[in-house]
Image (spheres, rainbow, N blue to C red):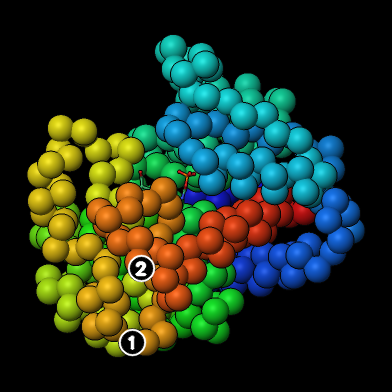
Amino acid sequence: MNHFLDIHKTDPADLRHMIDSARAMKTARNGAPKATPDAEQPLKNHMVALIFEKPSTRTRVSFDVGVRQMGGETMVLSGSDMQLGHGETIADTARVLSRYVDLIMIRTFDEAVLTEMAEFADVPVINGLTDRTHPCQIMADVLTFEEHRGPIAGKKVVWAGDGNNVCASWLHAAGQFGFDLTFTGPVQLDPEMEFVGLARNAGAQIAIERDPMKAVEGADLIIADTWVSMHDAQSARERRHNMLRPYQVNRKLMEAAKPDTLFMHCLPAHREEEVTSEVMDGPNSVIWDEAENRLHAQKAIMRWCLGA
Ligand code: CP
Ligand code: NVA
């Protein structure tokens, strides 16, 4: 049994296997006539609990659809509806859920909730986003990059904006998949130096460049994310916007990179804030493939977790 908690805690060979497996399942499924179930149903007779303590569109729908495509069933639970939100410990919740379901996906605030769930559950636990990381997103993103540009190893990825949870998982991936990452953003919103150190120790070149125009030189991929994440205080909104405005991904910034530099955003996006519509809807943007690939990547993650 495997937990999927973070990219840097997962063996690079296993990560590679999941990306390849996602791609193979995607090809098989997209080539098959609509409404034909997968030839094999690896999650048949499996019940998957999807727990959300924060809002979600993509994670919720892609996990739900992915489980069904593989023959399993899901139960979508909101943290506040469960006793979890009313004082029952995470450990006790994990023990009880393990008696009912075969796999738990949880989106939560504090990373400690995720790790406690994994420690006390007898079934695999998947990180569906915490304040600190979002590994499922980056598995889909690596798949998307490689579909468009081939192997990501040795490529230059630029993160523009807030050094947040999605940026953290990109740093983890840099170490595991062997690409270089440049962070460009205000010093107050730098990524966690622990994660920068991890990536560097794993052999990735990680640069911090305050000038966004310099940062994107030679970039193979530029990534943006919201300037105010779900865990950020709304009172910090204006201050964050003021700090982050110079890091908006717009035509001028894309032109400072290469003609074929890809653009990604995990979505939901705030058009004309962290990215202009011109870039989002432009020829270098692969955001809809990226959103679709959440489904395929997570199917591979679930199979890996269950050994199915
Ligand atoms: N990218 C992502 O995780 O989207 P949701 O918040 O809609 O799940
Ligand atoms: N950084 C964003 C990602 C949303 C998928 C957030 O945590 O709100």
Q: Is residue 216 visible?
A: yes
Q: Amino acid at mark 1?
A: Lys
Specify the quadrant of the image occupied by residue 253.
bottom left
Say if mark 1 contacts mark 2, CB within 8 Å: no
First reached walking from the N terminus: tag 1 or tag 2: 1
Compared to 73, does 92 lie above or below?
Answer: above
Label 1 sits on a secondary structure element that is: loop
- Could you classify mark 2 by the number of other residues whose Cα lies within 10 Å: few (under 14), some (14-19), or many (20 or more)? many
Query: Ligand 1: does it lie within 8 Å of the C-beta at label 2?
Result: no
> In the depicted view, which residue is nearer to us: 147 or 283?
283
Q: Amino acid at mark 2?
A: Val
Mark 2: which secondary structure? helix
- 172 lies above or below 271: below
x and y, in percent, of residue 263 in the image? 40, 71
Quadrant of residue 203 in the image? bottom left
Neighbour tally class for label 1: few under 14, some 14-19, many 20 plus, Cα within 10 Å: some
Residue under numbered circle 1? 258
Instruction: Count numbered badges in the picture.
Output: 2
Q: Position of residue 151 (x, y in %)?
A: 53, 83
Q: Residue at 81% of width from left, 68% of height from top?
A: 31
The quadrant in which the C terminus is found is: bottom right
| Real-space CA distance between mark 1 and mark 2, rounded to the nearest whole angstrom | 14 Å
Q: What residue lies at 43% left-to-right and 76% top-to-bottom?
A: 284
Q: Quadrant of residue 99?
A: top right
Residue at which label 2 appears: 279
Q: Residue at x 15, y 47 (%)?
A: 240
Q: Horizontally, is 283 left or right of 102 in the view?
A: left
Residue 246 lies, in percent from the top left, at 14, 63
